[in-house]
Image (spheres, rainbow, N blue to C red):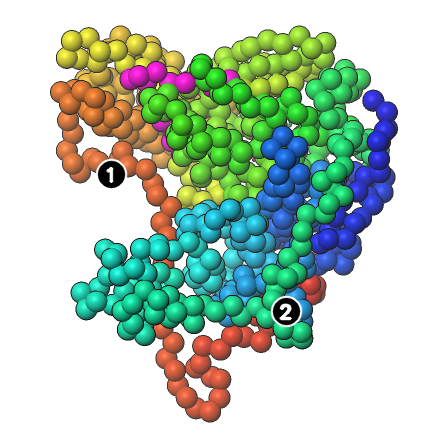
Amino acid sequence: MEQNEFMEAIMYVNGVRRVLPDGLAHMTLLEYLRDLGLTGTKLGCGEGGCGSCTVMVSSYDRESKTCVHYAVNACLAPLYSVEGMHVISIEGVGHRKLGLHPLQESLASSHGSQCGFCTPGFVMSMYALLRSSKNSPSEEEIEECLAGNLCRCTGYRPIIDAFRVFAKSDDALYSGLSSLSLQDGSNICPSTGKPCSCGSKTTSEAATCNEDRFQSISYSDIDGAKYTDKELIFPPELLLRKLAPLKLGGNEGITWYRPVSLQNLLELKANFPDAKLLVGNTEVGIEMRLKRLQYPVLISAAQVPELNALNVNDNGIEVGSALRLSELLRLFRKVVKERPAHETSACKAFIEQLKWFAGTQIRNVACIGGNICTASPISDLNPLWMASRAEFRIINCNGDARSIPAKDFFLGYRKVDMGSNEILLSVFLPWTRPLEYVKEFKQAHRRDDDIAIVNGGMRVFLEEKGQQLFVSDASIVYGGVAPLSLRARNTEELLIGKNWNKCLLQDALKVIQSDVLIKEGAPGGMVEFRKSLTLSFFFKFFLWVTHHVNNVNPTIETFPPSHMSAVQLVPRFSRIGKQDYETVKQGTSVGLPEVHLSARMQVFWSICWLAEGP
Ligand SMILES: Cc1cc2nc3c(=O)[nH]c(=O)nc-3n(C[C@H](O)[C@H](O)[C@H](O)COP(=O)(O)OP(=O)(O)OC[C@H]3O[C@@H](n4cnc5c(N)ncnc54)[C@H](O)[C@@H]3O)c2cc1C
Ligand code: FES
Ligand code: FES
């Protein structure tokens, strides 16, 4: 592969073309932006956890021939990973003098910023959601997109309120026919969720009332042009550009390679067996920056088409190892709609697990292979791959491929059955069969964007014999209880051949206690709590499967209605809060809900904090 054989390395930042010079392979996108003077993008944690560095990346998807927009954490994104892409930072979204974006206006006037450090990150997450959505997002989608952004000041309520007005509303609410119509004949305002204050009864009047309440306030102070006139487009040059391999250097002898075909990648792997492969850099970036590990040769596999391939067939789904987790989630949601319900039990389990996996910015770049090959003992997905009979396809530098069941792939702490001349090519997930059930589990300190204390993946395949159901096959896998994702083998053995009833539950709970041993002083602490989680997960699994088979065969087992909460999915509750202001008119602003003076600067902030680094 020749060096930069096609063209120079470039990117666009806020609509401006930038040539990326050689020598910056050590740099993150955040460092680069701030060096350009775009200091609205903040450095908070530097490890993908707070979202203050959020920017939107737009790239051209050659497969679907569309532009895709997504939020990323600039603190973890290597600069060269966005080569050929368009990066929009807070400075490219709106400006106080030239017109704030409606998102910024809404955030400022809803008291959604206090110190303002997190504010650009929140705006960018929401901006990326709006740019990537064909229709207005739902309230749940809005809250989901903000899960990777932290705010220490506001308590989130005003931020959610500010963005909620961009959610889609129920049109039926305008018609007066809605179930939410009030007894006195007035309607609930679709945007505020409150009775319409104008008291109008007709559809058109109600709509007018709503328009008045939320009329666009994003007009420029200077020329009166609407903000939308200034929305940055995807640069046409990037649409026409061919994807080229890259070889670029950086400080301390780092070399960055970007192969654009599997063959390129395997050649590089053969030449540099110790090279570090990366895709989203959410593990490697932390190893290099926080743990100070040195990887002189970095190979970015993100743009290798073979590693991004998708294949849905009669047996299951095969996905390339570089597929980003947000795309995996989209794929699963699609197949769940299209395929027979019994085939997609595992897909549904992955959907639930991915919903609570990191924040959106991480899921937008992190790939399947990165999670698998890191082999973290608290990986949320590995117990599920293992439980759901997935197979990993491995390929070596000579192009020879082999398959290995996921359940046999993990050998020890961050150790997998893969040689230094091999890479993970793809993952195959078989469809589930009738009476085969897969379920995910995760307990963390908080629901959103947190790593698991204990997680798990469980599967049971039942067989009907007369009026009874027997276990034909089972997988019980836990994370967070050992140095690797752990199969509870004795429990699996116990289950197979047994009648699915309460005796089986009691027996299994006994065996799990000896199967999953967490010694006193084990890393992670909370030993008693973790042990109890292993039991409660299985208890929930039993109830959940029983609940589902009851729909097919109501004679199996019953349990009290009070247990139903254990089988229900945990919804992402829409946070609704209310703040009352006591208006004390004393001729001053004291006591009034005034928008503070800095708010309109903070929402597009390019001011540098004194305490901030470069
Ligand atoms: C803020 C934050 C929150 C997180 N939350 C969660 C969470 O909730 N649950 C969870 O499970 N994880 C979580 N993670 C971990 C992380 O997101 C995942 O492990 C992620 O999937 C890694 O993917 P990546 O593309 O970023 O990997 P990279 O960092 O690019 O690579 C990771 C490793 O995988 C190897 N690798 C990648 N692809 C291949 C391949 N095809 N063949 C061989 N080796 C390969 C690389 O060489 C490297 O060693 C979190 C991480 C962060 C920073
Ligand atoms: S600085 Fe916290 S996520 Fe990037
Ligand atoms: S951290 Fe969110 S306003 Fe201060």
Task: Measuring from the top left, give residue 151's x and y in whole percent.
Answer: 52, 57
Residue 399: mark: none
Q: What element carries label 2?
A: loop
Residue 29 lies, with reference to residue 225, above or below; the image says: above
Q: Does the magenta stretch include residue 431?
A: yes
Left or right position of 131 against 517: right
Q: Nearer the viewer, residue 277 or 5?
A: 5
Tell me the kind of residue under disc 1: Ser
In which quadrant of the rendered view does residue 11 lie? top right
Q: Which of 486 and 15 is in front in this view?
A: 15
Q: What element carries label 1?
A: helix
> For the image shown, how many numbered marks are present on the structure?
2
Q: Which of 342 and 375 is in front in this view?
A: 342
**Region in magenta:** 428-442
Task: Measuring from the top left, give residue 371's x and y in whole percent.
Answer: 56, 28
Q: Does the magenta stretch include residue 359?
A: no
Residue at the spot 29% in from the left edge and 59% down from the top edge: 175
Residue at the spot 43% in from the left edge and 72% down from the top edge: 212
Q: Nearer the viewer, residue 189 or 378?
A: 189
Which of discs 1 and 2 lies nearer the camera? The answer is 2
Q: Name the residue under label 2.
A: 225
Left or right position of 203 against 386: left
Question: Is residue 54 visible to us here?
Answer: yes
Question: Is residue 283 visible to us here?
Answer: no
Residue at the spot 18% in from the left edge and 20% down from the top edge: 553
| CA neighbours of label 2 inside 10 A, class few (<14), some (14 to 19), many (20+) | some
Task: Measuring from the top left, give residue 358's x and y in whole percent.
Answer: 51, 40
Left or right position of 53 against 252: left
Residue at the spot 22% in from the left edge and 11% down from the top edge: 464
Residue 565: mark: 1
